């Protein structure tokens, strides 16, 4: 071939996707600069960030967010932290490494390095989607109007904009999505088309090793993907054939367990259960017996999972899963893109020319359905819907291939075909474009959040926490993740009652030094009677403080200090002292109350 023509061919193949890749990267960075605000971090983000920062600071997996229930399984360490068996460790390691690299390991720090790491994972995922689509639709790289791979990458980047939003949050889902699509791309190397030379046993073993490594990394990024392992193993067996599969499948499983073994060993050392997951007990939560997440507030587990199931609890879990499945289904258009989703599922109604593409599509459907069902057993979509981003990666490739197939089936003139492709492709990408270029105005964070985010001498946070730190005491709050991230202090989620508080103190070997009640209690806690009781206490305090506003400050303190507010029947918090005056949130009558007296909890038989 003429060298100049060969160079032109390489330029045509490499330059367009490279330009798109650089453009998306630049837009993502600009979006970060325009819209990122540490004061607006979500609770999940702060929980993840404080665990990553603990790793960056100590090189150990730990969390400063203490749930009373988990103190019965894992004792607290000398610094007040608890072994972190709730967050999948890969994101913790990478985000913690980014924090250490940027020397941001202090209180309230580390969010920006983690966001940049999440953005890098998201951008890498776009490149992996491009490579997967090139493998699935090689003939579609020259169809009128563009190529399948570029449209697939654009769909993932722009069809919903959820990936960019999760990266800015930040959230581990972008890392899991990159590993998921990389695993699928590796599977296509095992699955040869008819016209390609079949793999030797050695080649099959090599690619099975790669697939196993990605499967192990995926589990380390998202624990819930363990349920997909049999599907991946079955696919390796199917595409390798009986002779090669006898080697390929064991190699795949061995690679998975080698990669996962450090985490499995850590879990075994801490709990004597290699598959222990701190959130595994959510299987029996959100049921009639254990409504909401109230069980986390209890220091004791009334029934084991086995006892719950054997006493008929499986019916409650089934009912919960059915309700949750409906909420997940309602989230699919937003997660995948409202115009990409019909293309993705519509592809199930046709047969692509390449049988390998059909097999990958079917595996993607199986993975989505299986993951969907597994997540429904444990939690509502509001908690786990970010994980659907994983499935959007492969879905983008299938959807772009479906668009190519529809255009080709029309056998329209070149100009008409190109207009159809670009018209539909642009429409699919519009939602994400609004994320990039829209105003994205977000309501101002509560005054207390801004106050806590400051965490400096002027705000008084450090001064108030000094006695707590000096006594190695624990803080108690409805938003423990915020205190753990902003102030680097061990914080217990509001327990149910005085007995649970005592149990936590005894297990931790530390006293509870303060309780903070914030407007976060006004959120929705359906079925969580403990949270509702704390909310009642909060509202009584708010009302009393508002009514006493005209009084002299000293008289006001005396009035409130002599008032007993009962929560629940066995606790009477003594309101005095708290200092300074409660914060007014957003100019309204929503206050943040500080109780800095450890003797404030007194047993009381009746109101």
Image (cartoon, rainbow, N blue to C red):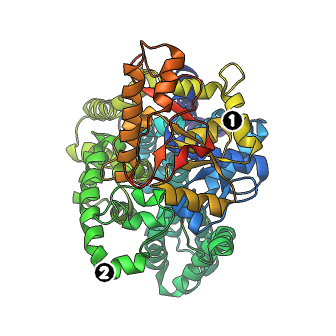
Which numbered dot is residue 596?
Answer: none
Q: Is residue 90 left or right of residue 526?
A: right
Q: Is residue 76 visible?
A: yes
Element under label 1?
helix
| Circle 1 residue | 465
How many residues crowd mark 1 within 10 Å: few (<14), some (14–19), many (20+)?
Answer: some
| Quarter location, residue 212 | bottom right
For discs 2 and 1, the disc positioned in front in the rendered view:
1
Residue at 55% across, 63% down: 70
Residue 585 in picture, x, y percent from top left: 45, 22
For the N terminus, the quadrant is: top right
Q: Residue at x 41, y 50 (%)?
A: 383
The percent coordinates of residue 250 (x first, y second) are 58, 82
Residue 29 visible somewhere in the drawing: no
Percent x, y of residue 257: 62, 74
Read off the residue under disc 2.
311
The image shows residue 368 at horizontal and vertical percentages of 36, 60
Q: How far apart in space, not on screen, are marks 2 and 1 (Cα)?
A: 46 Å
């Amino acid at each position: 071939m003429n060298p100049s023509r060969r160079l032109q061919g390489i330029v045509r193949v490499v330059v367009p996707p490279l330009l798109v890749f650089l453009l998306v990267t630049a837009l993502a960075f600009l979006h970060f600069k325009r819209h990122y605000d540490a004061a607006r971090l979500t609770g999940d983000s702060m929980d993840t960030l404080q665990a990553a920062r603990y790793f960056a600071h100590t090189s150990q997996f730990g969390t400063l967010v203490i749930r009373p229930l988990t103190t019965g399984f894992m004792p607290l360490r000398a610094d007040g932290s608890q072994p972190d068996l709730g967050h999948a460790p890969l994101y913790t390691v990478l985000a913690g490494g980014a924090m250490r690299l940027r020397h941001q390991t202090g209180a309230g720090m580390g969010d920006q390095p983690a966001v940049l790491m999440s953005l890098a994972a998201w951008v890498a995922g776009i490149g992996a989607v491009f490579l997967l689509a090139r493998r699935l639709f090689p003939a579609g790289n020259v169809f009128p109007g563009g190529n399948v791979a570029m449209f697939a990458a654009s769909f993932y980047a722009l069809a919903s904009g959820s990936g960019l939003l999760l990266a800015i949050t930040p959230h581990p889902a972008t890392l899991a999505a990159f590993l998921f699509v990389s695993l699928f791309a590796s599977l296509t190397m095992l699955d040869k088309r008819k016209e390609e030379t079949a793999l030797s046993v050695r080649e099959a073993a090599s690619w099975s090793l790669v697939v196993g490594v990605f499967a192990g990394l995926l589990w380390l990024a998202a624990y819930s993907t363990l349920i997909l392992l049999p599907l991946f193993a079955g696919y390796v067996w199917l595409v390798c054939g009986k002779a090669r599969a006898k080697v390929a499948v064991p190699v795949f499983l061995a690679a998975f367990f080698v990669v996962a073994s450090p985490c499995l060993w850590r879990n075994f050392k801490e709990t004597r259960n290699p598959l222990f997951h701190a959130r595994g007990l959510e299987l029996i939560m959100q049921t009639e017996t254990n409504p909401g997440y109230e069980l986390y507030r209890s220091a004791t587990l009334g029934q084991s999972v086995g006892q719950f199931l054997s006493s008929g609890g499986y019916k409650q879990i089934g009912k919960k899963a059915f309700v949750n499945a409906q909420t997940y289904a309602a989230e699919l258009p937003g997660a995948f893109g409202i115009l990409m989703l019909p293309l993705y599922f519509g592809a199930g109604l046709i047969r692509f020319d390449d049988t390998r593409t059909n097999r990958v599509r079917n595996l993607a459907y199986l993975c989505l359905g299986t993951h969907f069902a597994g997540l429904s057993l444990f939690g509502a979509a509001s908690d786990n819907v970010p994980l659907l981003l994983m499935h959007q990666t492969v879905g983008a490739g299938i959807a772009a291939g479906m668009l190519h197939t529809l255009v080709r089936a029309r056998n329209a003139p070149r100009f008409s075909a190109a207009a159809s492709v670009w018209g539909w492709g642009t429409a699919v990408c519009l939602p994400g474009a609004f994320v990039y270029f829209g105003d994205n105005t977000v309501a101002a964070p509560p005054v207390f959040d801004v106050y806590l985010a400051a965490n400096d001498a002027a705000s008084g946070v450090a001064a108030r926490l000094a006695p707590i730190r000096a006594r190695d005491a624990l803080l108690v709050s409805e938003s423990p993740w915020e205190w753990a991230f902003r102030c680097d202090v061990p914080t217990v989620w509001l327990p149910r009652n005085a007995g649970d508080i005592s149990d936590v103190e005894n297990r931790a070997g530390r006293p509870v030094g303060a309780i903070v009640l914030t407007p976060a209690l006004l959120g929705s806690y359906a079925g969580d009677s403990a949270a509702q009781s704390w909310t009642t206490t909060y509202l009584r305090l708010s009302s009393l403080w508002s009514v006493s506003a005209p009084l002299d400050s000293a008289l006001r303190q005396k009035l409130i200090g002599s008032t007993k507010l009962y929560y629940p029947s066995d606790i009477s918090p003594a309101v005095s002292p708290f200092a300074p005056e409660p914060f007014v949130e957003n100019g309204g009558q929503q206050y943040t109350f500080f109780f800095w007296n450890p003797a404030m909890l007194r047993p009381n038989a009746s109101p």
